[in-house]
Amino acid sequence: MAMYESLKGRTVLVTGGASGIGEAIVTAFAGQGARVGFLDLDEAAGRALAARLGEAAHFEAVDLRDIEALRAAIGRVRERLGPITVLVNNAARDDRHRIEDVTPEYWRERFATNIDHQFFSTQAVLPDMEAAGGGVVVNLGSVSWLVSPDDFAAYKTAKSAVAGLTRALARELGPRNIRVNAIVPGWIMTQRQIDLWLTEDGERELMARQCLKRKLVPDDIARVALFLASDEAGAMTAQNVIVDGGWV
């Protein structure tokens, strides 16, 4: 990966950082010499990653749907690593569901899992970024609402909201020198995707539709996250950057 001198020594917070795309992002920032705090519900995976990365990373186990617990966990990262000036809002779950089976409670839970914490994590780190004279927020969206098959309407609706949230935050926070962009991944082959959703038919269809005839992996997203967080992207804000191999 390219090395970005502007990331060295910065405190970065990654939500959903214990596995999949989040794990790749945490590892990539640690490799840049950043101090990386990451949050996840999966305590075993989180502790394993923190042990592997050593002093470069600090893990907090938390349910991001609990906003007060989220705020407290961010506070503990701040105490351990210092003021947070890069935030990567990665956490999400793309569980499948039929429209007929969705209850009001499930609908609200899907939004709590996939979009609410992006706003409240940003709100929680805002004082750090203002005090530092600026910062960067990178939200994770999804192309699912543009191209995907059926069976997860709540997820797709929440992920479509990331585009609007990103532009709204960028407009409001730009005068404070805080940049806000989103990465919009295609079908990234995390272990979860391989285990739960990837089929021979699905892979054939994906390869037929993608311009690039290879499967995308978590590092493909991590590389873009590094760039957007670095000073090399210093003129970029309010952008939704599609990283899907040309699927859309």
Image (cartoon, helix red, strand yellow):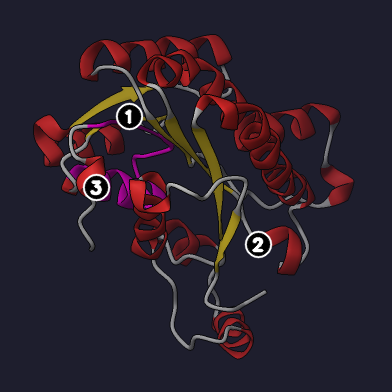
Q: Relative to 108, is 180 on the left or the right?
A: left
| Residue 129, quarter of picture | top left
Cα separation between marks 2 and 3: 24 Å
Q: Which of 235 and 61 is in front in this view?
A: 235
Considering only vertical position in the picture, is 48 above or below 218?
above
Mark 1 vs 2: CB contact within 8 A:
no
Residue type, numbered disc 2: Val
**Residue 115 % position (x, y):** 65, 35
- The residue at the point 31 percent across, 52 percent down is 24
- Residue 114 in the image: state x and y as whole percent: 62, 38
Please tell me whether residue 29 belongs to the stretch shown in magenta.
Answer: yes
Towards the viewer: 166 or 106 = 166
Quadrant in which the C terminus appears: bottom right
Q: Name the residue under label 1.
A: 43
> Which disc is residue 143 wearing?
2
For marks 2 and 3 on the same chain, the one whose residue lies earlier in the sequence: 3
| Cα gap from disc 3 to disc 1, whole angstroms | 17 Å
- Is residue 146 found inside the magenta-colored segment of the image? no
Residue located 25% across and 50% down the image? 28
Secondary element at tag 3: helix
Q: Residue 27 carries which label?
A: 3
Quadrant that contains the N terminus: bottom left
Q: Which of 71 and 3 is in front in this view?
A: 3
Which span of residues is magenta-colored?
Answer: 10-30
